């Protein structure tokens, strides 16, 4: 991973085949990643930036005019960034001829709406398939070979769509050339303004319906030795490898060389078909929620991870040589009823093969989950191991998840998928984004330290105890009340928005809050739906009183009190309730 420094590897690759942009950018000039404590943050215009985004449906930006109704929808729901697909087919309709109109139009409209952009490069692969490459690539199946699956069959993965193989330098170089052209153009039009803050490279790569590519080139590589580069990486990182990977290597005696099957264990026999729905029962009873999260047919998945990552590393190097901003790849995740590789794209950047991706693609900055699973927190925990920064490019609109991802897992950003769809953006998400927009400077200042965390409480959960600063906080679910805090001008109250769902009036099933300790006796709380009690955990008087409780918001970074809390609002000073969609500043005192 490269943080806050320019990659020279990209320069070396670039001189080989491309017209490259200048590498004379200083990290402070362009969006880049920087470490703060154990967090990694995105720095835009010299300051940490929290991406509060949504991802457009795949083809929303394939024409500019139909996008017009989308912009106000994003702005009115308090997004600060939008994730937008760029189709290789539209970008390079003829080989070597690039069409910049759409990219330019999207950047222009985003600027007018004060939004940032993360572009998604739909190059060789999207959702394991190859539907976005240009016609001149698709029709040339000799120059751009396809994968084979099963017993050597050329099998369509998704209707008539064939899938490009990673085992082709011609395919890799064509993709990299186009991506470099895109990045060079973004630098030209945006290198000073930084509307574009990050790039996704490809989309949910991996082989579907089999565990690996079985084309002749892939079979030859699979029968050959594991590359020395990967073996060296495993040996030098042996003590810190992700346990799922270390376990399969250990089971094969930590071999220092050999074929993929010798080093990592058996691949799947070609004749064994992957059931489309691999049910949990095929895998035996689930002992706990994580028991399906391991490598099945390890050598196949590891082989594919290496090959996708090697390919993408070259694409990323070419892109960064032209314009060096943070770049990530996203993963379609393993699921309880889709636990075998091939039921999810085999070789994608899933947690069990993160080390393989790190070894093969050091210029990829972030391995990101498309996180639709109910086990939101445990996926975050698996993705932040070994210092991988968290960014959630696709997810649902649950506002509790954004609070937890930001406050507990230091996410760089959060982005529900299909934000332009027919349904209104849920007002609960818009209200939560409003709070986070206001308080993000404070949140970002605390990220990576032990002065910030977040909690989630579901109806029926026992109270949670969190040690933070000089107190232990006891958090008890209360759910929504009829009192929705008055919103500042221009902000949204969930129940006031046009199209507010009935659910906006109902108690939320999940309460969540970010908790920040800002002084020896001072806290800010963001979110809501819970009661908060305090126990002193430092020497001195042990009784704790609510000294001063303010509800408010931040205007231009300054705290503005909108309601002073006492009397009936805190049970005459005895019970502190963080109501939904609010920010509280609480100062405590101690007495004997
Ligand atoms: C995940 C993909 O990455 C998206 O592009 C989109 O296809 C969604 N799935 C659809 O649910």
Image (spheres, rainbow, N blue to C red):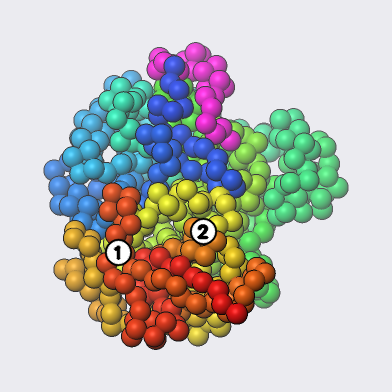
Mark 1 and ligand 1: say if the CB distance to the nearest ligand atom is below 8 Å. Answer: no
Please report the residue visible at 54 percent of the width from the left and 24 percent of the height from the top: 7
Please report the residue visible at 51 percent of the width from the left and 14 percent of the height from the top: 16
Residue situated furthest right in the rendering: 253
Q: Which region shows up in magenta?
A: 1-23
- Label 2: which secondary element: strand
Give the side of residue 228 with respect to residue 1, left or right: right
Give the side of residue 412 with respect to residue 579, left or right: right
Q: Kindly report the distance in space between the C-alpha atoms of the residues bearing marks 1 and 2.
A: 18 Å
The quadrant the N terminus occupies is top right
Q: Quadrant of residue 491?
A: bottom left
Please report the residue visible at 40 percent of the width from the left and 17 percent of the height from the top: 21
Frontmost residue, 316 versus 8 = 8
Residue 505 showing in the rendered view: yes
Q: Is residue 575 magenta?
A: no
Q: Look at mark 1 in the image and give the residue it sits on.
A: 561
Q: Position of residue 269 (x, y in %)?
A: 68, 52
- Label 1: which secondary element: strand
Frontmost residue, 567 versus 230 = 567
Q: Is residue 58 above or below residue 182?
A: below
Q: Quadrant of residue 290?
A: bottom right
The 10 Å Cα crowd at callout 1, few under 14, some 14 to 19, many 20 or more, is some
- Circle on res. 519: 2
């Amino acid at each position: 991973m490269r943080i806050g420094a320019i990659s020279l590897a990209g320069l070396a690759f670039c001189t080989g085949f491309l017209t490259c942009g200048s590498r004379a950018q200083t990290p402070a000039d362009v969006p880049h990643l920087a470490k703060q404590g154990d967090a990694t943050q995105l720095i835009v215009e010299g300051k940490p930036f929290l991406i509060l985004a949504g991802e457009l449906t795949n083809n929303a930006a394939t024409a500019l005019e139909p996008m017009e109704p989308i912009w106000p929808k994003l702005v009115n729901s308090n997004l600060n960034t939008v994730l937008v697909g760029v189709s290789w087919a539209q970008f390079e309709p003829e080989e070597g001829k690039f069409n910049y109109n759409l990219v330019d139009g999207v950047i222009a409209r985003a600027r007018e709406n004060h939004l940032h952009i993360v572009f998604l490069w739909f190059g060789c692969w999207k959702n394991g398939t190859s539907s976005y490459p240009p016609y001149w690539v698709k029709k040339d199946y000799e120059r751009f070979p396809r994968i084979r699956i099963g017993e050597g069959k050329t099998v369509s993965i998704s209707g008539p769509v064939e899938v490009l193989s990673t085992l082709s330098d011609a395919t890799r170089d064509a993709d990299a050339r186009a991506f470099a052209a895109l990045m060079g153009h973004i630098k030209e039009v945006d290198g000073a303004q930084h509307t574009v803050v990050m790039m996704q490279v490809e989309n949910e790569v991996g082989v579907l319906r089999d565990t690996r590519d079985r084309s002749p080139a892939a079979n030859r590589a699979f029968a050959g030795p594991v590359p020395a580069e990967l073996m060296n990486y495993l040996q030098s990182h042996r003590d810190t490898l992700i346990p799922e990977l270390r376990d399969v290597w250990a089971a094969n005696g930590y071999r220092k060389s050999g074929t993929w099957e010798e080093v990592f264990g058996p691949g799947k026999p070609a004749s064994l078909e992957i059931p489309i729905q691999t049910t949990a029962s095929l895998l035996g009873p689930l002992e706990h929620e994580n028991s399906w999260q391991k490598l099945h047919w390890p050598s196949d998945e590891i082989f594919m991870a290496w090959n996708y990552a090697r390919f993408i590393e070259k694409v990323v190097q070419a892109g960064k040589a032209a314009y060096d901003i943070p770049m990530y790849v996203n993963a379609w995740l393993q699921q309880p009823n889709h636990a075998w590789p091939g039921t999810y794209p085999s070789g994608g950047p899933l947690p069990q093969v993160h080390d393989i991706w790190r070894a093969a693609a050091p210029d990829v900055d972030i391995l990101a989950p498309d996180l639709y699973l109910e086990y939101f927190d445990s996926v975050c925990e698996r993705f932040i191991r070994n210092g991988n920064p968290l960014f959630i490019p696709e997810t649902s609109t649950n506002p509790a998840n954004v609070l937890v991802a930001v406050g507990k897992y230091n996410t760089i950003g959060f982005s529900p998928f299909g934000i332009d769809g027919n349904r209104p953006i849920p007002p609960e998400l818009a209200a939560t984004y409003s709070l986070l927009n206001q308080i993000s400077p404070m949140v970002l200042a605390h990220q990576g330290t032990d002065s910030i965390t977040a909690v989630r409480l579901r109806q029926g959960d026992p109270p949670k105890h969190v040690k933070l600063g000089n107190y232990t906080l006891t958090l008890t679910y209360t759910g929504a009340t009829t009192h929705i805090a008055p919103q500042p001008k221009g902000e949204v109250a969930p129940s006031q928005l046009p199209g507010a769902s009935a659910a906006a009036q109902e108690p939320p099933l999940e309460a969540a809050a970010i908790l920040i300790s800002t002084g020896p006796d001072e806290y800010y709380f963001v979110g809501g739906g819970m009661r908060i009690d305090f126990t002193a955990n430092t020497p001195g008087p042990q009784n704790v009183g609510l000294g001063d409780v303010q509800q408010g918001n931040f205007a231009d970074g300054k705290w503005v009190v909108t309601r002073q809390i006492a009397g009936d609002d805190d049970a005459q000073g005895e019970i502190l309730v963080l109501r939904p969609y609010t920010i509280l500043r609480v100062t405590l005192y101690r007495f004997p």
